[in-house]
Amino acid sequence: MESALFKIIWVIFGFLCSGLNATNNPPSLLNFNRYIFVREDFPINGSLGILSARDLDGPMEIKFTIKDEVTRSLVRLSEHFGESTVNRSVEIILKKQLDRDHEPSDRKLYFNLADGEGSSANNLAVQVTLFISDVNDEVPEFVNLRYKESIYENATVGTTVIRVSAQDPDNGLGGTVSYYMEPVAQAADELYKNAFRINSDTGDVIINSSLDFERHNFYEFVIKAKDGFGNESINNADFVVTVLDVQDTPPAFFNLPYSVVVGEDKAVGERVLQVTALDGDRGVPNGIRYTFVQGGYQNFNVDPNTGWITIKTELDRDDASIQDSGGVYAMYVKAEEVMSGVNYGNTTATTLVTISVSDVNDNTPTFNHLNYTATIQENMQSGVPVIFTANTIMSVNDIDQGLNSYFEIVLEKDGQPYYDFAPLPKEVFSESSILIRVNNSVDLDYEKSKTATFDVIARELRTNPKRSSSVKMMVHILDVNDNQPQFENTSYSAQIAENSPTGTTFARLQATDLDSGVFGKITYSVRGGNGRFGINDSTGDIYNTEALDREKISEYYITVEAKDGGGFRTTVELNVKVTDTNDNKPLFTREAYFASLKEGATSFVRELKLEATDLDEGMNSQVLYSISNIQPPVTNTFTIDDATGVVGLSRPVDYEQLTSSGQIMLGVQVCDRGLPSLCSVINATVEVEDENDNKPVFNHTTYQVNIYENASIGSLAVKVDAYDLDGTAPNNEFVFRIESTTQEKFRVNFRTGEVLVESELDHEQSSFYSLNISATDRGSVSLEGYCIVNINVLDVNDEIPYFDPRSQSLAILENKPVGSQVVTLTAVDTDSNPRLMYQILQDSILATDEEGRDVNVTANNIQNYFDINETTGILLVKSVLDRETAEKIELKVLVKDLNGWQPSADLQTATATLTVTLLDVNDEPPEFLPGPQYHVNVSEGREVNDLVITVAAVDKDKKQTVFYRIGQDDINSFQIMDSRVGTVTLKKQLDYESNHEVSFTVIATDSASPPSSVLTSTATVSVSLIDINDNTPQFLPHPTQYSVEENAPNGTFVGNITATDRDSGRFGEITYSLQVTNDDQSLTIDSKTGIISVLKPLDREMREEYILYVTATDNIDANPNQQRSERTGAIFVKVTDVNDNHPIITNIGTTPKSVVENSQNNTIVDTILANDADIGANAEVEFSLVSVDTNASDSWFYITTQYNSDIKNNEGVIRNKQSLLGHVGMYYVTVKVQDKGTPTRLSSNMTLLIEIIESNENLNQPQFVVPKGPTATLQIKEQQPVGTSVIQVSATDADHGKNAEVHYYLAPEKDYTKFQIHKDTGLLTTRAVLDREQQAQFEIRVIANDSGIISVLDNSITIFVQLLDIDDQEPEFPRRPDMEPYILGPVPEEHSMEYCGTVDVAIDRDSHVNNSLIFYYIIGGDMVDHFYLNQTGELYLIKAVDRDGDVTGTPINFINLVIWATPLGYLTFDKYSTVPGTQRMVSQKIEMRPPDDYDSSNTTLLWAQVTIKDINDHPPKFRNQNLSVGITRKTQFQETIFTLSDEVTDLDSGNNSVHTFHLMSLGIYPEALRNKLPSDPLSLSSDGIIRTNTIFQSDMSGYILMDVSAQDIDGKMANASLRISLINDDQRVKIIFRMTPMQVRNFSETFRSKLERITGYHIVVDKIQTHENAQGKPEADKTDMFIHGEVIKPFRIVSAAELLSKIDGEAAALVPILNEYNILQIVSAVQQTEEEDSNRLLIMGLILLAIVLGIPCIVMAIVIFLITKSYQRKLKAATAMVYGQENDMQKNQLPGTNLHAYENANPIFLEKVLSQESQDYDDTDSVDNNVVDSPVPQTVDTQEVSMTFTADSSKDYTHNSSLKTISSVIGSQENSFGHRNPLFSNVNGDTPRSHLINGLQASEI
């Protein structure tokens, strides 16, 4: 039974299991996030997110797959990972780059989740939305890349030319596009740049400034676009504008000037000259009409078509008007274009025409009066002219010209020549004034004859017949003055007081004259007296003119003159004496007085006496003395003798009472005895000498002092002070001294009074000392003062404190309050009086964090965590503790006994260690990263649950978890769904229009327990909303009815329709547009402001009302699908009337109105109707007759105004007033019609013909309609062919029939000759080719007249024709002196990419910017590959230039370039290549001359020169680092011996090559010289001059070694050593050159080196100077070089003889050097006297004579012996040694000659001879090999010989000539056997002498 039960249970269990397995549950997603947010720049192969799922029932692994191809193309899935039953996951991997800009911004990704395969598997569809956020990865792209437009140059500013468009698919700010543009032309001027502007938002290109075709007819701009983040478009748009021209060029004359000469008898109608003008618009020239416009043209005609000028009326050269103009008619002819079209400029031109009229003889000489009267004084000398009466002037003229007006003037009396008078001039051309002069003064006597009468005749000289005329002349003779005034006496005297006021009369002098009348009237004057006196010119009273001073001048001598009316003068002398008054105060004889006085004395050291003098006389000069002022306290101490001025003492003076350093100032007064008395005051200075009368006094009589027994020796115990009342030193100076014994424990400083410890103190031995101290002054008799010093000695402390224990540890909470006690540290000190002080050693504090890492104590302020009470040792919390910063702190505590003495208090110390562990408390709130402020931009279009931002926070406390929640959220729009993750999403949608900026807070909370200890932190998130265009513009309330007057000017405000848009930015920017029913473009609206205004003139009579609709559109630049707009209803604009129309009579026709002459009064003649286009009162009319404009009587007709209901206006009825009988005929009246408008009543008149004559009045003049206005400006291109159309003018006439037929012509003025106009059509064309460069604008006046029957009416318009420039001029560079070369730079050397300057100095006379564009290229010069020239003329140095020539060896101070200016831009040729067929030559040395490529006549070329600026890139360099110079011992003190600057080179220039010199070290050698000289025997100045600093003695020898340096301004340095050797003059050798000193200095170093190599000595050049001849005169073409030789080791100076000997020994090597350097002589610097030479020669001669006489005897004996013993041949050979028979004294003059030398051996071959003789002797050359006795080898002296061969300066010696010269010298020596060689002399003491041989100079040694 149990087994059956078991089976049943098993079956049930299996059934249940199988049932369970049959139910397959689907998998479920884990942590599924439907939305993924990524940026569009998310990297490929990056993980977008993870899909996770699990299937609890298995058994198959679950699997994610991609469901569709779109998803598969975008992403892939990674390998699966994780267990299906736990967490099976797969990553979504991006496989294709995202692009939000061109693809959807959100992508749906479809996946499938299956838990197996087949139909039994569960499949779960998974949809993930991928939101792609934008990055600014796109740049704006233009819709079109090229925009082209044409526009007339008179287009108005503000006109939109074109609109460009660019698009950026980015979102937000990155998708906004702004525009800007730049000119393409490199040479664009400001007019070009600013001609157009672009609306940065819309892309509208707008005219920004007035266009001018003549300046620029073509514009090209690059338009660029950039997005809101500044990313610019890659492909920019080109914008090209062509400016169209208008006609505006006037005509111009040619064949100027116009001038001709015609005879005055030329017939009327004859041609004179022709003027010719052409239309300035040469392409389509107009005809020219000529007229006179101003000037003297009345006698001439001008043909209006041909320009021929003819004679109109007879000419008269003698006419006054033509005489005034010099016989020249000057007139202006106007050439006026005959217009055939519209012209916008001047159409006329004028020119000056001069016509000179030549003369014929048709006039007689004519006097200006019929007779003349004159006067002359008697006895008047010859040549004086008579005086014509009545202010008349005799003149005569002949108005003919040239020889026709040449005539003579003669005098006749009774038909005979008259010679008492003569005319001047005697011959006259044309016209002259005539003088009649006295010719015979003898008969000119008033007493003989009172008048003279004669004829004056003018007669032509060179004409036939000779015309003449005559006049009568009467001369009246006048009497003259002939008597002088006379004084009664020959001299006079007078006196006057010196204080007399000005003008005092003190004498009168009078004279008489026998003449009468004016000649007898006498006038007085004075001279002399220094101008101090005057005289009454009529009475003779004499007075003073200024104050007198007797003390200066006591007596005057003046001259009085009397002059009569005829001018005769008589003089007399007057002596004036000045009497004295008291006007001078006494003056002291000295400027100051001084006296000395001893303190306590009763008299002065020397007498004090004051003296004064007075310049006055008598009592006024006597003086009295007194003391006027004296300072206290010596007020009554001094007296003075009033007569003598001697100062005395009434009592002694105490120096110490004086207040001014011993000086007393006495004020002494001196007064004279005059009335009133005058005084002077002076100060006398009394110096009081101090006496020692005060003893020193101590400040205290007793001093009490305490001092420790450990006071150190020398320490201060006390300082005593004293003073001395004496006023001066040494009386008030004193010294201190201890008078009593102190057991030598103390001493006092005798100057300062400081009492110091002298030896160690011991409190136990003595605890008290008493010192008696004195102060003794230094007066001549010393005085003393005393004080007592009591000193107490105190005990000291000496035990060291210690801690117990020395280290401790403790733990405290980190939140322990500041100021709370931590622990008490106590130290022990066994001293009885310890004073312990505790402190923490800050530098010893250590800290570690919870990880055991060291913490920076100072940076984290840990040193301030604790403090210790310095007296109790209690450790306190000083500042807030922070375990998170440092968990364990180790402190070092120091204790110090402040009373410690042994050792010192600083050494009586101990330390202890305290370790403090901080225990954690929850004191750190979560901390947001990176900070508590967040900012995010969110579009208002975001959906609910969309991500806003993710924040994060950390907690520094241990084991804390951070939770997040939303804090303050004013708009309740944000949420955090997972509190453990700081992801914030939208709770509801945002609205930008409600809030642009919103903020909320996120609170972070830690997980501390209990809840009361939880800490929080708050972060603020600022959200900037991004607007989207979600609001439509809304119009503000506005009227629907507006009005505007019809005469409102353009721009008049009509109304303002405004709308608002709640969106922002471009979405909220509203653009207004206007739709007008039947739009005639009269009104416009401002697209930005909505202001409706008048665009063009209104005319109510044409249109009374406008119906408008205004549309407001936002986001105007966007795609229309992205715009929102709103339109208003109908808006009505009423045009109101103004009185702008004249009333017009409408029914007066061309037919006269007739009236029967017998008509009754008040018969209606006519009814006048009028029309006024205005309305209201402006159209209501009334009529009247104009009384002044009629040929009828005022009493005949009248007119009345009455209302006509049919026409609803008034009419005028004309009636007759009276009977018209007897007045038959044609009459007219003027009817005036006038409206009643305001403010001005307008009217018009019309003439009505009455009676029998038909009337057809022409009422209207033609009105120009093309062009309009009184002036117009047109433009045409220059250089157009003749006949080019300018404009077709058109004028209309409101009349009818003939009165309305209009014809055109050009007014003959201004530039009309350059144009012509068709009479009927008005087509204005050019008559000449016009050149803008000659004339840019022409002015013409076009006249239009009608064909009126009665009268012709006309009108005119002035047209200015402007020429538009074409490119017909080449650029030109100016040719001025400062432009050749054109200097650029400087640019620094060794630099590249340096701006050199601009060569943009060429000019192009074309005016248009495109025609005047100039491009620049480098086409030649030097080093052109080093430069870059852009086409605008900016030159750059692109390769570094070495100015100093380090590489090339040639310095480069400037570089020449050839620049070409051309209108051709962007040429592609190689600007560094040359013209084909040529080869560029770049000189190695750049010279200051034009480059070969430069042609000065070609003005398109510029010679540019770039200057190179030096930089300090080279250090100074000594030519030789081992310098030497020799100075003699005779060198004077401070004498310049060497200039270092001459030895230094520097490749730099300017200030960079200015050096300063420094002495590094100075050594004196040998020691003997060092002991004799000072340490600084030489001085070196900063400019490199070395001077002696001592006097050298004759026994000094050795040298001075100086180490010197040269340094430039930047510190670059060079070093050298200079050895200065002390030498004698006889150690110097002088080399004489035929060159200047400068030339010699240039090669001195090279020459020295060569000479050094030849001689083997160290050669030193001591001095180079101009050569002086034997007379001591300088020879400028010769130079002396002084040298000396040295042997370096061991150092010695080579004598001149030794050096010369060495030079002579190297003669062969020296020959080329002597010739190369043009050396004249090499001699010793010191020449010995002739007497010394003679004595030396005599001694040497005697020695040599003895030798010479002795040797021949020995030789003769040997010869005789050999003769008997040897063969003949051997004998013959032996006799070759015998000398000749010449005087042996001559051998002394041969160089190298001694007893063993051959006769006359030439020194050049001597070397060979000597070398042969110096060999071992053998008998090889013996004549007989069987010689018995071998001769002993002879000892020979080796002689070094120097020869100097110098070519004569007047000859050109070559190397061959030098050899020939040497050969000739050798030959001369060989031919003078037995004679001494004149080139050489013995060196044994002989002085060299110079001889001239064969044109050469040689040095003899």
Image: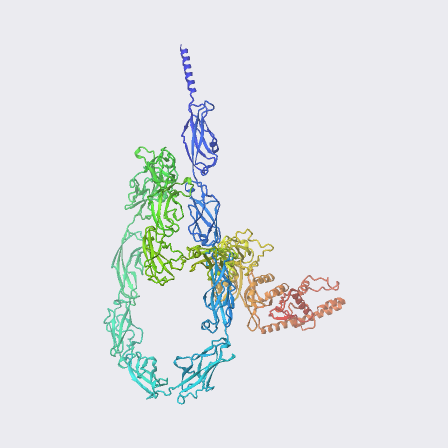
Q: Pick out the residue farthest to the left.
A: 636
Q: Quadrant of the C terminus?
A: bottom right
Q: Is residue 507 above or below residue 732?
A: below
Q: Pick out the residue farthest to the top.
A: 1
Q: What is the basis of the colouring in this image?
A: rainbow
Res 627 seen here: yes
- Residue 749, horizontal then vertical, whole percent: 31, 59
Q: Quadrant of residue 1888?
A: bottom right
- Residue 88, horizontal then vertical, whole percent: 44, 28
394 horizontally vs 670: left or right: right
Res 1240 seen here: no
Tell which of 50 and 1233 is nearer to you.
1233
Image point (29%, 49%), residue name = 796
Q: Is residue 248 above or below residue 546?
A: above
Q: Quadrant of residue 925?
A: top left
Q: Quadrant of residue 1808?
A: bottom right
Q: Pick out the residue farthest to the bottom.
A: 448
